[in-house]
Amino acid sequence: MMNERVVLVTGAGTGMGRATVRLLAKKGFDVIAATRKAENFADVDDENIRVFELDITDPDSVKKIFEKIERLDILVNNAGYGLVCTVEDMDEAEMLAQFNVNVFGLLRVTKHAILPMRKNGGGVIINISSFLGKIGLPLLTFYNATKYAVEGITDSLRYELSDFGIRVHSVMPGFFDTQFARSNLVMNQKTFSEDSPYSSMVSRLAPQIVDQINNGNDPNDVAELIYRIIEDESFPARVTVGDKASKFIPMRKELSDEDFERRVRDYYGL
Ligand SMILES: NC(=O)c1ccc[n+]([C@@H]2O[C@H](COP(=O)([O-])OP(=O)(O)OC[C@H]3O[C@@H](n4cnc5c(N)ncnc54)[C@H](OP(=O)(O)O)[C@@H]3O)[C@@H](O)[C@H]2O)c1
């Protein structure tokens, strides 16, 4: 056990996080599954998996988990959820909570992960962003803003940490069949009310997005990709995974902003 590389995965309870925990444990890593709900692992009996309670919105909870970790080689910043809300309907608490998990939570965990990696002479930080970290969509402005922020964090940290042998990467998934749309989309009440001036847009777009997520790619593909990033020292800074990301991200690069917007409008009937 002592010489095995230690990996910490946040948001480990379901979806991509859980798939990553399982795959890396199978590959022989010492995996710390960090979750708000340890009961999600009640059925898992694997000597390579240690389940630690973690609430990334609570600085003390983050500090405490790192008091228990002596060595860390890899951090997978995976925890995240989506707020579906127009900007006009913005609710202060919902907005702050969205950033507190997807951006500030990621930064809190990363802060503490750096020291053990520096002491170790290196490490790998993998941020699970989204293809919506490079592409905007209506009703998802707050989520988009958090994922655009994650992209910026990856870019800055690559400079800040490279002298210490710490690699930083962004993974930009398209739509994946996880608990994301089933339990972790927060729908703002006003935006989803029948008399909302946005009701036509909501009724056209929201069911398409939910449907595309629930019928999306297999989260095991993300786990496989994370394993490849860990093992390949020359892996690119950012990578897409899944059908929608592989379709829209190259298109986003090739087309002008306006031409890309027209394609997205046509695609979603906006
Ligand atoms: N599914 C998609 O289509 C898709 C597409 C692009 C990007 N992503 C991103 O991929 C990552 C993983 O999502 P997933 O698709 O695997 O969805 P998921 O099954 O919903 O898993 C997300 C995990 O994040 C944690 N989480 C959710 N809400 C939270 C909250 N309010 N506070 C703290 N932690 C919370 C939970 O972990 P615990 O309960 O274990 O603490 C949860 O298991 C997220 O960052 C998401 O934004 C997903």
Image: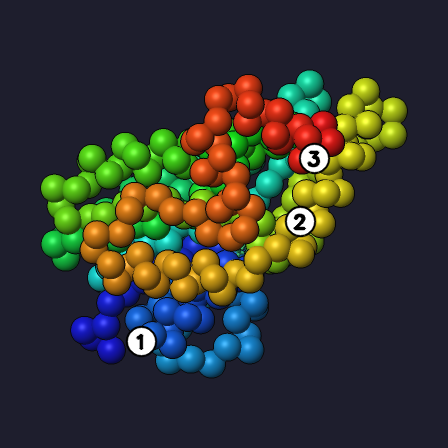
Mark 3–mark 1 distance (CA, rounded to whole Å): 43 Å
Q: Mark 1 points at which residue?
A: 28
Q: Which of 202 and 82 is in front in this view?
A: 202
Q: Nearer the viewer, residue 110 or 82?
A: 82
Q: In this view, does 36 lie above or below 148?
A: below
Amino acid type, callout 3:
Tyr
Indicate if the residue with disc 2 has its beta carbon within 8 Å of ligand 1: yes
Q: Mark 3 or mark 2, which is nearer the start of the sequence?
A: 2
Q: Nearer the viewer, mark 2 or mark 3?
A: 3
Q: Mark 3 points at which residue?
A: 268
Q: Nearer the viewer, residue 157 or 232?
A: 232
Q: Is residue 104 above or below residue 219?
A: above
Q: Can residue 33 be seen in this view?
A: no
Q: Check residue 212 in the rendering and tell me which mark sits there, or answer none.
A: 2
Mark 2–mark 3 distance (CA, rounded to whole Å): 11 Å
Amino acid type, callout 1:
Gly
Residue 143 lies, in percent from the top left, at: 56, 34
Residue 227 lies, in percent from the top left, at: 34, 63
Q: Mark 1 or mark 3, which is nearer the start of the sequence?
A: 1
Q: Counting other residues with Cα less than 10 Å from the Cα at mark 3, is it few (<14), some (14-19), or many (20 or more)? A: some
Q: Nearer the viewer, residue 221 or 192?
A: 221
Left or right of 223: which side holds 209? right
